[in-house]
Image (spheres, rainbow, N blue to C red):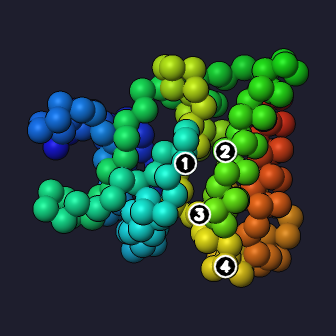
Amino acid sequence: YLIEALIAKTRTHHIFRALDKRSEKHYALKFANANSENSAAARANLAHEMALGNHIRLPNCVTALPFDQARQSGLYAVFDFIKGKNIQSTDARRYGLAQLLKIGIELAERLHLLHQINFVHADVKPDNILRGDDNQLYLIDFSLARNRADASSNNGGGTPTFMAPELWQDGAVSPLSDQYALAVTLYALATGG
C-alpha cells in the first residue's frame, strides 16, 4: 500500500487513505496510535475489529476486510475506502423532520440487519456515520461491536453522551442500547449539537 493522506485522527487511532499498488484501488488503513495513553486498549480494539470483519459483511456497514497475512505487516486494519465525510462534519446544521426521518430509517435498517446476525454496534453516534459522495449513509467503526452472546456487560465501551442509561450501571449492550444511541444521534442532528 502507498499511504497518500491522513483522513481521520482520534485519541486512539489514525486512519489513512492508501492506494493498493496492485489493484490501483483505494483503501482506508487504520492504525492504533502508539502515543495514546490507552495504546494497549487501542491495539486490542483494532484486533477485535479485524476479527469482526470476518463475521459482519452487510450493506453500508464498513467493516475490516479479512486479514491478509501475505501482505499485511504490523497491526493495522484494512477497510474499503468510502469517499465522503462523517455526517456531523458534512451536515453541521439542523435537520428538518423529513431529513431526520430518512436518516433514521436508513440507520435503523442497517442496525436491524446487524442485530439479526446477533451483533450490536455499541458506539452509534454522528462521528461513526459517513455520508458518502454517493449520498449513501455508511455505519463505521465497529471496534466496540460485540456478538450479543458475549455482550453480558458494557465493559466501559461507548461514547458517554450516546450511551443508554443502563450502560452506566454496567448493563449489557443490546439492540436496545443501539436504538437509544440512534435516537440521541437523531436528536443531536436535529438540534445541531
Q: Quadrant of the N terminus?
A: top left
Residue at numbered disc 3: 145
Looking at marks 2 and 1 on the same chain, the residue that comes earlier in the sequence is marked by: 1
Residue 170 at x, y = what percent? 77, 78
**Does 145 appear above or below 17?**
below
- Secondary element type, mark 2: helix
Judging depth in this view, the residue of 32 and 140 nearest the camera is: 140
**Does 79 appear above or below 75?**
above
Looking at marks 4 and 2 on the same chain, the residue that comes earlier in the sequence is marked by: 2
- Secondary element type, mark 1: loop
CB of mark 2 within 8 Å of CB of mark 3? no
Residue at numbered disc 2: 110
Rounded to the nearest angstrom, the CA distance separating label 3 from label 4 is 12 Å
Inspect the image, locate mark 2, and give the three-letter code of the amino acid beneath it.
Arg
Residue 73 at x, y = what percent? 16, 62
Asked which quadrant contains residue 104, the reply is: top right
Looking at marks 4 and 1 on the same chain, the residue that comes earlier in the sequence is marked by: 1
Residue at numbered disc 4: 149
Asked which quadrant contains residue 69, the reply is: bottom left
4 relative position to 43: left or right? left
Inspect the image, locate mark 4, and give the three-letter code of the amino acid beneath it.
Ala
Residue 30 at x, y = what percent? 35, 51
**Does 106 appear above or below 110?**
above
Rounded to the nearest angstrom, the CA distance separating label 2 from label 3 is 14 Å
Looking at marks 2 and 3 on the same chain, the residue that comes earlier in the sequence is marked by: 2
Work out whether residue 39 can be spotted. Answer: no
Looking at marks 1 and 3 on the same chain, the residue that comes earlier in the sequence is marked by: 1
Inspect the image, locate mark 3, and give the three-letter code of the amino acid beneath it.
Ala
Numbered disc in front, either 1 or 3: 1
Judging depth in this view, the residue of 100 and 44 nearest the camera is: 100
